[in-house]
Amino acid sequence: MNRFERRPAAAVEAEVQYLDGDFRVVRPGSFVRCAVTQEPIPLEELRYWNVALQEAYSSPDAKLVRLGLRDKIAD
């Protein structure tokens, strides 16, 4: 490994502050957990969250389940 290569990030859960249209990493890590499914979501794939509840979601279906608009996540 040369000095320009990055070491792989440890599989540590990040602490994130969810903002309108963006998020801020408070404690570094490589993933956050979905509030519905508990699946790890890599930060580079994080697309869905709720600012008021400060929760992340793995998919639009997971967010609908959390909001009570759907009974379960579609297969």
Image (spheres, grey):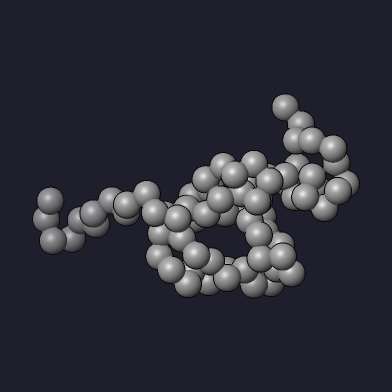
Q: Residue furthest left?
A: 2
Position of residue 31 relative to residue 20, above or below, is above
Residue 41 left/right relative to 66: left
Please tell me which residue lies in front, 47 or 72: 72
Please tell me which residue lies in front, 46 or 13: 13
Please tell me which residue lies in front, 19 or 35: 35
Position of residue 38 relative to residue 20, above or below, is above
- Name the residue: 79% across, 45% down: 65
| Quarter of the figure that contains the C terminus | top right
Q: Position of residue 6 (x, y in %)?
A: 24, 57
Q: Position of residue 54 (x, y in %)?
A: 66, 65
- Name the residue: 88% across, 46% down: 69
- Name the residue: 20% across, 56% down: 5
Number of numbered tags placed on the structure image: 0
Q: Position of residue 9 (x, y in %)?
A: 32, 54
Residue 4 left/right relative to 45: left
Q: Position of residue 3 (x, y in %)?
A: 13, 61
- Determine if residue 75 is in view: yes
Quadrant of the image occupied by residue 73: top right
Please tell me which residue lies in front, 2 or 56: 56
Residue 11 left/right relative to 43: left
- Determine if residue 44 is in view: no
Q: Residue furthest right?
A: 69
- Name the residue: 56% across, 50% down: 33
Q: Residue furthest top?
A: 75
